[in-house]
Image (cartoon, coloured by chain):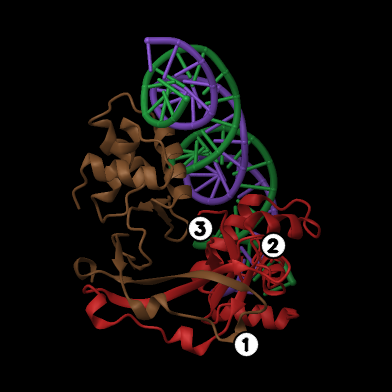
Chain colours: A red, B brown, C green, D purple
Amino acid sequence: MRLNLEELYTRFRRHAVRLTRQRAAIYTALAETTSHPTADDLYQAVKRQHPMISRNTVYYTLGVLRHAGLVQEVNVGHEVARYDGNVMEHHHLICLGCRQIVDIMDEALNELAVSDRQTKGFHILGHRVEFHGYCAGCQ
Amino acid sequence: MRLNLEELYTRFRRHAVRLTRQRAAIYTALAETTSHPTADDLYQAVKRQHPMISRNTVYYTLGVLRHAGLVQEVNVGHEVARYDGNVMEHHHLICLGCRQIVDIMDEALNELAVSDRQTKGFHILGHRVEFHGYCAGCQ
DNA sequence: TGGCTACATAGGAATGATTCCTACATAACA
DNA sequence: TGTTATGTAGGAATCATTCCTATGTAGCCA
């Protein structure tokens, strides 16, 4: 997905996030990939255009974007945090071989619920599903 | 669930894990709670009986038990790793307030599958579901 | 359009869970 | 009971992430 400046400006404005060159670069890098990069992947990518950018800015920005709902954090087990520019409700396939993460858009999964007997008095707001296995290349 | 020594001995034997005082203490502490403690929680608990135990032993032992399938790691977002002595197939409720984790045993969740259109060539071996919300106390 | 001000950034230091290293101890088997 | 492979303690190292702070700048207002 290619993003132009107006679109970027509108999105940030809508979520009350101040737009800077660094933020534009970080968000664009993330929104244009489906590979669920780590903070450091993004730092390395953005550094090509912004050699002076600091890792701290990347972390701080990801935090801001996440709070604003422009970005999601995806965690595979206890590994390094990875990020997802796709904020529509969706779930993940995780390859146990190459650790790649693939999005699944599936209405049935989105509508999943726990049986009342099992909610243990919780007020449930959302859920996450991850499937583990081996991708075509790793089988 | 109370564990006696014979039972412990049988379980470890069955999974080809060498039994030591430290391992017995760590595994027992974990198997007798449903609170999904962290490695440090277990270290603190076990230290009462074994003042000389090292944190390293706790980490190393949890690794061994996990590989042997006697213990599971549970990860909530990007927080500290937590452990679960319940190795039957099950899923989790997570409280966004107090961060407690509650087990859900639910056949329907265990049998969840992705629609074929969505497997993207993956050979799927298992899945995890976590529900997020607020527990009775935190609402 | 220029100036103000609250918020961003860079860069380095600090944190803290986890892992690594290694000398000593001990469970399990013969 | 002795041997040996494996476990343990303790301290050092790692490394993703967060904290600190001086300087820079986006966005608003006159």
Q: What residue is shown at x 43% (from left), y 43% (from top)? A: B16
Q: Say if A82 sits above or below B21 in the image.
A: below
Residue A71 seen in the figure: no
- Report whether A25 appears left or right of B108: right
Drawn side of residue B96 relative to residue B119, left or right: left
Query: Residue at the spot x=74%, y=55% of the render?
Result: A44
Q: Specify the quadrant that holds the C terminus of chain A.
A: bottom right
> SS of the residue at dot 3?
loop
Give the labeled residue for mark 1.
B117
Residue occupied by mark 2: A22
Which of A73 and B85 lies nearest the eye of the viewer? B85
User: Mark 3, chain letter?
Assistant: A
Q: Nearer the viewer, mark 3 or mark 2?
A: 3
Image quadrant in which you'd find residue B102: bottom left
Q: Tag 3: Cα neighbours inside 10 Å, few (<14), some, or many (≥20)?
A: some
Amino acid tagged 2: Gln
Mark 1 residue crowding within 10 angstroms, few (<14) / some (14–19) / many (20+): few
Closer to the camera: disc 1 or disc 2?
A: 1
